[in-house]
Image (spheres, grey):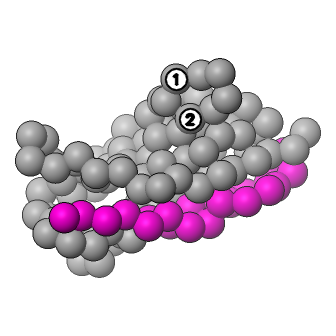
Amino acid sequence: QVQLVESGGGLVQAGGSLRLSCAASGNINSINIMGWYRLAPGKQRELVATITGGGSTNYADSVKGRFTISRDSANNAVYLQMDSLKAEDTAVYYCNIKRLPYLNAWGQGTQVTVSS
């Protein structure tokens, strides 16, 4: 069983920065995709960014140029550096690890609130 634990959320003013961290533990194969998704009130969960084991990244258009995803594969950790935060970035952010069809695990979520 795989467990994901997120940290780093909080309250920040618009224009500020936050760094989210996620640590995965359990039976994890090195071939996987780690990523961050978010769920805002009244909206569907959306992809924020993903990163493969080889370091290839993918970002939502809304965060390109502001957010940076990185990972420490040796420690099964993934990070999300969020800069130039906007009020519309307010959401619960979820860490995810995938190796379909064998693995698709989610963290408990961490709240990010950006005040305008």
Picture residue at 77% right of the left edge, 38% below the top:
86
**For numbered disc 2, what is the local secondary structure?**
strand
115 or 86: which is nearer to us?
Answer: 115
**Crowd around label 1: few <14 · some 14–19 · many ≥20 (10 Å):** few
| Magenta stretch secondary structure, dominant | strand
The alpha-carbon separation of the residues under discs 2 and 1 comes to: 6 Å
**For this view, does 46 lie left or right of residue 3?**
right
Answer left or right for 39 relative to 83.
left
Q: Residue furthest bottom?
A: 75
Residue that badge 1 annotates: 44
Return the x and y of residue 99 as percentages of the image width and height. 15, 48
Looking at the picture, does residue 43 appear above or below residue 26? above
**Percent position of residue 56, x then y:** 28, 47
Q: Earlier in the sequence, mark 2 or mark 1?
A: 2
Q: Is residue 13 magenta?
A: yes
User: In the displayed structure, would residue 64 be above or below residue 97?
Assistant: above
Q: Which residues are magenta?
A: 1-22
Q: Amino acid at mark 1?
A: Gln
Q: Nearer the viewer, residue 2 or 100?
A: 2
Is residue 80 depicted above or below 104 in this figure?
A: below
Please tell me whether mark 1 sits on a helix, a strand or a loop.
loop
Q: Please state which amino acid type lies under the numbered disc 2.
A: Leu
- Numbered circle sitting on residue 39: 2
Is there any visible trace of residue 29 in the rendered image? Answer: yes
**Marks 2 and 1: CB-CB under 8 Å?**
yes
Which residue sits at x=12%, y=41%?
100
* Observer-nearest of 20 and 103: 103
Q: Quick one: 66 or 95, which is closer to the camera?
A: 95
